[in-house]
Image (cartoon, coloured by chain):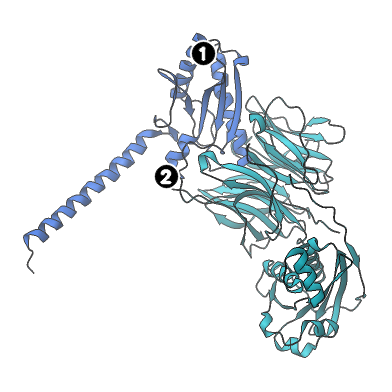
Amino acid sequence: MIFTKSTYNLILASFFALLLSACATQQKAAKIDSQIQGDVYTGTDTVEYLAAGVPDRVFFATNESVLTTASRDTLRKQAAWLRKNSDINVVLEGHADERGTREYNLALGERRANAAKDYLMTYGISENRISVISYGKERPVDSGSNPLAWSKNRRSVTVKAN
Amino acid sequence: MYKIKLISFLIVIFLSSSVHALIEVDITRGNLNPLPIAVSPLNSDKETNDKFKKEIKIDNIGDEISLVIENNLKATGLFNPLEKEAFLQKPDVAHLKPRFEDWSLIKAQALITGRVEFKDDKVRVEFRLWDVLAAREMLALAFTTVPNNWRRIGHIISDKIYERLTGEKGYFDTRIIYVSEKGPKTKRIKKLAIMDQDGFNTKYLTLGNELVLTPRFNPTNQMVTYLSYFKNLPRVYLLDIETGIQEVVGDFPGMTFAPRFSPDGKKIIMSFAKDGNSDIYTMDLENRIVERISNHPSIDTSPSYSPDGKYITFNSDRSGYQQIYVMKSDGSNVKRISFGNGLYGTPVWSPRGDLIAFTKLHKGKFYIGVMRTDGKGERLLTENYYQEAPSWSPNGRVLIFYRETKSNSEGEGFSATLWSIDLTGYNERQVITETDASDPSWSSLLSN
């Protein structure tokens, strides 16, 4: 069988294309891994800021309401910001991912928002300035059905109330 | 707001049927051998047809009512309605005196015949159920009602036939309340909707301005309890679907959710969440007295009464994970009953009292199952990517629940649909709705 030069080039080109796409897939997998640690989202894709350097949300592991080290760091920044801006009140919106029963998720969202509230209160924010609402699994921020999307959705978001 | 017309049915037994039936349908085995049944179109004369055509735009009322009956019977999986093309005898003659040889020739074991008449602005329907092999009449009834109720007549006839052939009450003259869903997952619009059990007569009860979840029927009347995010305060509401009047249940300083009625319809049982802890409460609808039933620093939710009102089943994560518990209705004697692998939620007590239906989550799959009230005899009926929230048919033979499909990273491919399955695990089928749907609740029988 005789290959013309152009056929040879084509085969070579498609081989490299394959190699490249394999790399891309690996990179994507690595990127996802680096965004979830121990089932908790650590990325910044969905994070908004209440003020410069003050992230608005914290993330949770599946079925959990325990605050991670990173979450406590975020909440301390929020507490500092709230102390400086004493006229601002906040609503803590608790959320769950879609892999649970609706009613349990409502309770879980409430528990997560309260975990954040308790932490803000230990850093001197008055209970009167914080209200809590749970949306359970009703308001995902990422509509995908995959572990990364679910990790972004397991969250408590601090929202300005006034 | 949807208003239901007060409906009065006149039911007359015009022929007694004391003869013993030879045919019997065993509903405990599933649909391995559905009973061949011939549903002869109900006979309606030209005058009746013309009046119906004028009043409610239906060409042949007799055909339409028999179609309702046929579809109901077929959907049970217990009956096999035969093709009408094969029928040899005309409907009017068959109703007077069936030629049983003709019907047994096409392998029918039971035959339904009937007649529709339009009289003084009312519609009168009579029907007979015949045992073809024994060549005997088994049942004969007549109904009179307003023309707009014609589908309900089909449902009531279906219930009578089901009851006569299975020995158990039917579930056709019933409705389903559910949540109609539209829009992207991140901004889903949800409305309360109600429809007949067979998917007809859909009405929307809310406009979709606020999030609504988990509607449930009062087993004794046409009241509904549900969760609404009205003014962004998630609270349990009570809705009278006849008048459209709604009110918030109790005065709780936080989220109330997961409501259900007590079997006598006089109380609402629900969860109240405060400071990260959800416990179970009841409110008496007459004297408005609120009682705390469970008191534990874990999530206690999805409560459901036993039909005698003496016990409550609920799910709690007090063991570390979501599991099913049973307690006395005063909150004492709490016992965990689910011990299988995985998480268990949404327990709901069968109206027959002997079983608890539930949702189970195990290794990334969701199951609908049933177990005895002591937790023994767990039986999983169906496995899927996501499904939950079973609700019992009033006779305790069928469960309705909802399913969601997986979506890709753009959120495409997502759907929410209603499904029903027999207690036997057979006869799984989609319940067709106009929009995406979730959180179904089955009413009790509207008549009798």
Residue at 74% of width from left, 87% of height from top?
B104
Label 1 amino acid? Leu
- Chain ID for label 2? B
Question: Which residue is nearer to you in this view: B83 or A152?
Answer: B83
Q: Residue A105: x percent and y percent?
A: 59, 37
Q: Residue B8: x percent and y percent?
A: 88, 58
Tell me the shade of chain A: blue
Residue at 79% of width from left, 83% of height from top?
B132
For the image, the number of numbered tags is 2
Label 2 – label 1 distance at C-alpha: 35 Å
Residue at 9% of width from left, 59% of height from top?
A6
Q: Quadrant of residue B64?
A: bottom right
Let me know if residue B408 appears in the view.
yes
- Residue B405: give its label: none
Query: Which quadrant of the figure contains the N terminus of chain B?
Result: top right
Q: Secondary structure at mark 2?
A: loop
Question: Which residue bears the numbered disc 2?
Answer: B409
Establish if A20 lies above or below A76: below
Tell me the shade of chain B: cyan
Q: Quadrant of residue B300?
A: top right
Question: Which residue bears the numbered disc 1?
Answer: A82
Q: Residue B291: x percent and y percent?
A: 80, 31
Label 2 amino acid? Ser
